[in-house]
Amino acid sequence: METIKNYLESMFASMPNTPEVRKAKAELLQMMEDKYNELISEGTSENAAVGTVISEFGNLDELAESLSLTKEVEVARGMESEMPRRFISLDEAKSYLSNRNKKALFKALGILLCIISVSFVIIMAPHGMKVLSGVGMMIISIALGIGFLVYSGFADHEWKFIGHEACSIDMNTATYVKEKRRSFEPIRALCVSLGVVLLVVCWTPNILIPFRYMPLGAGIMFLVIGIGVFLIVYPNSIARGFDRLLNVNEKSTISGQYANGGSYTRPVKYKSKTAQTICEVYWPTVTCIYLIISFLTFSWGTTWIIWVIAGVFHRVVMINCTEDEN
């Protein structure tokens, strides 16, 4: 029976998601179930019963008139001919998600290395000639970080068509992706929460470590910031891979609803390119402001309030820069 349901989903995948289509789909499913149960009661094997049901009810073009879907079928066929969609199989989806994990790791590591690179100079600066070693280590750290970032940009080159071309996934693939995302969500929530906590308390080494060791405290602070950013970037980058796959189907069709349910989050839709740029640079800008003010005033015990204020304003920025897709 599951085979029949999956076949029905594939039949209606490109149909407009309207009340009439959903009603006809439910009616057809009931007819297929009744026929299947009738055949099974007559002693027909399951495979033979499934084959008979599909052969009798498996052509939507022939059933369009009896289901009052003639117009909807024409619209669906017209959309298919005007914009053919590249089908992404379950195996391809698994490969994409595996590749996305690798891309996310190298991206997060690249950012981490770039952030902590300054720690080497800060810690070694008070030790005379050792500052040259610190500069060398900083350059190596930045070079490795940039290398990882560049590699992450090429890591998913073969999957660039996702998000740039018209694609589609079936219900089985969507279900698999949703389950993977649902199981990953607690890990993402834990990592992001810990990352935010580290960013908020990153100033504490400057208070806990004696003043004469201030460079060490500042160096540790950047290490904590780097780890915090890593814990935010890595899981969120993986989560965007799930979202991208679940977002490939045309939203106005039945298959466009496969992503609904579970822990799926619809990707943010910005009002303009400028709005997108503002949102993307918001938190890096806040971080820079926080560090500049903190270093100038050395008021690490109070400048953390910047994060609280930034959190409130972030909500205002998102409301004004993104579109509501209700």
Image (spheres, rainbow, N blue to C red):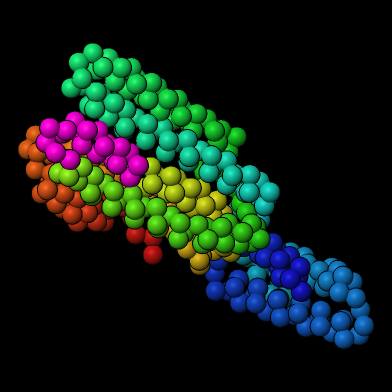
Q: Quadrant of residue 158?
A: top right
Q: Residue at x 25, y 33 (%)?
A: 219
Horizontal placement of 80 versus 316: left or right? Answer: right
Considering every residue shown, the one lying at the far left of the view is 297
Magenta extent:
209-228
Q: Nearer the viewer, residue 169 or 116?
A: 116
**In the picture shown, does residue 178 fall above or below 203?**
below
Residue 128 x, y percent position in the rendering? 20, 15
Considering every residue shown, the one lying at the far right of the view is 43
Query: Residue 32, can we see it?
Result: yes
Q: Quadrant of residue 136?
A: top left
Q: Nearer the viewer, residue 174 or 192?
A: 192
Q: Residue at x 18, y 54 (%)?
A: 308
Residue 276 x, y percent position in the rendering? 32, 43
Check if residue 170 falls in the magenta segment.
Answer: no
Residue 306 x, y percent position in the rendering? 15, 48
Query: Residue 274, can we see it?
Result: no
Please state, as top left, top right, bottom left or bottom right, where the N terminus lies in the image.
Answer: bottom right
**In the picture shown, does residue 294 fall above or below 319?**
above
Q: Residue at x 73, y 65 (%)?
A: 7
Please state, as top left, top right, bottom left or bottom right, where the C terminus lies in the image.
Answer: bottom left
Horizontal placement of 29 versus 56: left or right? Answer: left
Q: Quadrant of residue 47?
A: bottom right
Q: Residue at x 24, y 23 (%)?
A: 124
Residue 171 x, y percent position in the rendering? 64, 61
